Amino acid sequence: MSPNAYAVPVKQALQFFSRTCSVFNEDDSAYAPTPGQFTVAQHVAHVAQTIDWFLAGGFSPEGFDLDFASHQAQVRAVDSLAEAMTWLARSVDAASATLSAQSAQDMMAPIAEGPIMAGEPRAAIVAAIAEHTAHHRGSLAVYARLLGYAPPMPYSA
C-alpha cells in the first residue's frame, strides 16, 4: 500500500459519515434519545476526538492516552453541531496529512506497549478509525430516524 493510500479510508469515512449527518441542522445539536447519552453534537465531537487519539497514540512512544475522564469531559462540553463538524474536518485533514507523510516502513512500525493495540503495526489505526467512525455513523442514523429524518445512503453521492 502506498503511503497516500493510508489516508483514503479516513477521508472516505468522513464522506460516508457526513452524508448520514447531512440531515441534521444546528437545532438538532442537543438531541439525545435519553438523558446521559451523547447528543448529536457530542457524537460528532467524539468521532473527531477519537481520530486525533488514534493518530497520537499510534505514533507516540508512550502509546495511547488513557485519561478517558478527560476525554469524556472535553466531548461533553461540545454543544454545537457546526463546531463539532469543524473539529471533525480538521481531525480528518490532520490525519490524512500525517498518514500521507509516512513511509511504508513507518506504517509497519509497532504501536507502543500498553493496553491498546500494543505491537500492532501503526497501519492498524486506519481500520480502527474507519470502524469507529462507522459505529457512530450508525448511532447517528438511529438518532436521525428518531427525529423523523431519512438519512441518505452513505455510499452514494
Image (cartoon, rainbow, N blue to C red):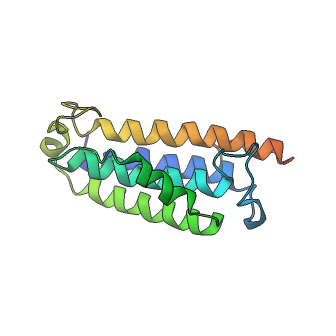
Residue 64 vs residue 22, the one in the foreground: 64
Q: Residue at x 22, y 31 (%)?
A: 120
Indicate the position of residue 107 as horizontal and vertical percent values.
20, 42
Locate residue 38, reporting x and y percent.
Answer: 63, 48
In the picture, the quarter occupied by the N terminus is: top left
Q: Is residue 149 found left or right of 7 in the rendered image?
A: right
The image shows residue 84 at horizontal and vertical percentages of 57, 63
Q: Is residue 30 above or below residue 62?
A: below
**Up/down of 74 relative to 8, above or below:** below
Task: Decide if residue 134 is on the left or right side of residue 124.
Answer: right
Q: Residue 75 placed where, x, y %? A: 52, 57
* Side of 19 where 5 appears, left or right: left
Q: Which residue is painted at 42% across and 60% down in the image? A: 91
In this rendered view, identify the residue nearer to me: 68 or 125.
68
Q: Is residue 120 left or right of residue 74?
A: left
Residue 157: tell me if it is visible: no
Q: Nearer the viewer, residue 41 or 144?
A: 41
The answer to whether residue 7 is seen in the rendering is yes
Question: Residue, x 58% and y 63% (percent of image)?
Answer: 78
Q: Say which residue appears at 42% left-offset and 54% top-offset.
A: 70
Residue 155 vs 48, above or below: the answer is: above
Name the quadrant containing residue 26.
bottom right
How many numbered discs sit on the rendered protein? 0
